[in-house]
Image (tube, grey):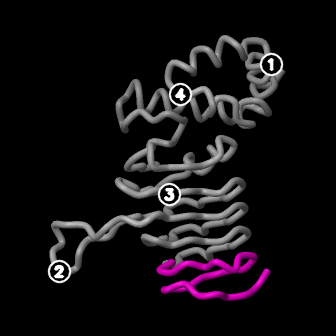
Amino acid sequence: MNKKKFFKKLINISRPIILLFLSLFFEKKYLNSHHFLVGYAGYKWAFRSIWQRSILRLGPSLPFPASVNCFISNTNNLKFHPDDLNNFQTNGTYFQNMSAYIVIGKGSFIAPNVGLITANHNPSDLNEHLPSKDVIIGNNCWIGMNSVILPGVEIASNTIVAAGSVVTKSFLEGACMIGGTPAKTIKKL
């Protein structure tokens, strides 16, 4: 029996005990996501997160499994569906949401090195921030690698943000591809 089959069998046999253990570290709603019910990716993420964030103390503990390379300012201001835990496993994701919300629609994908930012510095006084504004991403969106979404931006459902884009304004039409610096509509999907 190979390692993968052995691990799957072990998880299936001891699932209730493992979930009880994981509930010491993470909120139960995230442990009921499909990543824990189908396959074993959620378990891998959870144990890695416990190891990195709780045992090695490489980052703050979070209410859900996340890569140590995923920065989140305020988990209370982050709204997403528990089935989308995969968005917090990639390297370099940056969720700056100290006093405004970041809302990520169900089924959306966020690539590595993406920044979602709810507040900027005041250009007149870099020691202070401008007022925060929510960032809202619709359902079934794809935010490409190295993209930045700035404060107050809303992206409608079924929108693709091309890699390396800087999104400075809202795109409410949906079902389109946007890209560039600043981002503009490239084509309808």
Circle 2 residues within 10 Å: few <14, some 14–19, many ≥20: few
Tell me the tag on residue 102: 3
* x 72%, y 80%: residue: 176
Residue ID for mark 1? 9
> Does 27 lie within the magenta span?
no
- Identify the element where label 1 is drawn: helix
The CA span between labels 1 and 4 is: 23 Å
Q: Which residue type carries mark 4?
A: Phe
Q: Earlier in the sequence, mark 3 or mark 1?
A: 1
Q: Which residue is mark 2?
A: 124
To which residue does mark 4 refer? 26
* As drawn, 155 above or below 60: below
The front one of 56 and 131 is 131
Q: Nearer the viewer, mark 1 or mark 2?
A: 2
Q: Nearer the viewer, mark 3 or mark 1?
A: 3
Residue occupying the point 75% across, 16% down: 10
Residue 169, how many percent across, how many down?
51, 81
Residue 172, position in %: x, y?
64, 78
Looking at the rendering, in which quadrant would you find the C terminus? bottom right
Measured Cα–Cα span from mark 3 to mark 1: 37 Å
* Percent of width and height locating residue 61: 41, 33
Amino acid type indicated by mark 3: Ile
Labels 4 and 3: the sequence-earlier one = 4
